[in-house]
Amino acid sequence: FNRSYSMRDQGIYTAENAHSSDGYVMPTDDQTQKQMLLCLFAAGKVFQPPPEEYGQKSERQTKEPPKGFDSIRGIVKRVGQDVDFALISYQDNQIYPFYRVTYE
């Protein structure tokens, strides 16, 4: 995984819902369709910070999950009452690209 595109830290972000990833997808060569990866995620023991900590500077500089945890579940976007969550890994071997989905 190429972490140079990471928005926040060195984590690999995976969305719980496909609509959350739609703004970050790769276009096809002819620019007529979009592509995203459907991945298997071996999340292990997941840490979920308290809501009041989401978006704080310390969270954005995370380099690994807290001791005793394998991944992190966090809010990546709020729009009104809607909340988009992501599962975040800091180890390449936790995520396996399973399908490449092409859509319009």
Image (spheres, rainbow, N blue to C red):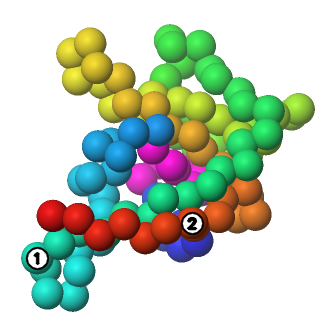
SS for dot 2: strand
Query: Residue 48: within the magenta?
Result: no
Q: Which residue is drawn at 11% across and 76% down?
A: 32
Query: Which residues, given as a range, are shown in magenta?
Result: 7-15
Q: Which residue is drawn at 45% across and 64% down?
A: 37
- Are the two marked residues, 2 and 1, in contact with CB atoms closer than 8 angstroms? no
Label 1 crowd (10 A; few <14 / some 14-19 / many >=20) = few
Q: Which residue is drawn at 21% across and 87% down?
A: 29
Q: Work out whether 57 lies above or below 15.
A: above
Q: Looking at numbered disc 1 in the image, what kind of residue is underneath it?
A: Thr
Q: In this view, does 61 lie to the left or right of 29?
A: right
Q: Work out whether 33 lies above or below 60.
A: below
Q: Work out whether 80 lies above or below 66.
A: above
Residue identified by numbered label 1 = 32
Query: Residue 10: within the magenta?
Result: yes
- Check the picture and name the quadrant holding the C terminus: bottom left
Observer able to see residue 39 = yes
Q: N-terminal of the two: label 2 or label 1?
A: 1
Tell me the number on the disc at residue 98. Answer: 2
Q: Residue at x 13, y 79 (%)?
A: 31
Q: In this view, does 30 lie to the left or right of 14?
A: left
Viewer-proximal residue, 27 or 11?
27
Q: Work out whether 13 lies above or below 78.
A: below
Q: Is residue 104 left or right of residue 38?
A: left
Q: Quadrant of residue 48?
A: top right
Q: In this view, does 45 lie to the left or right of 77?
A: right
Residue 2 drawn at (x, y percent): 54, 73
Residue 79 drawn at (x, y percent): 23, 23
Residue 1 drawn at (x, y percent): 58, 71
Q: Looking at numbered disc 2 in the image, what kind of residue is underneath it?
A: Phe
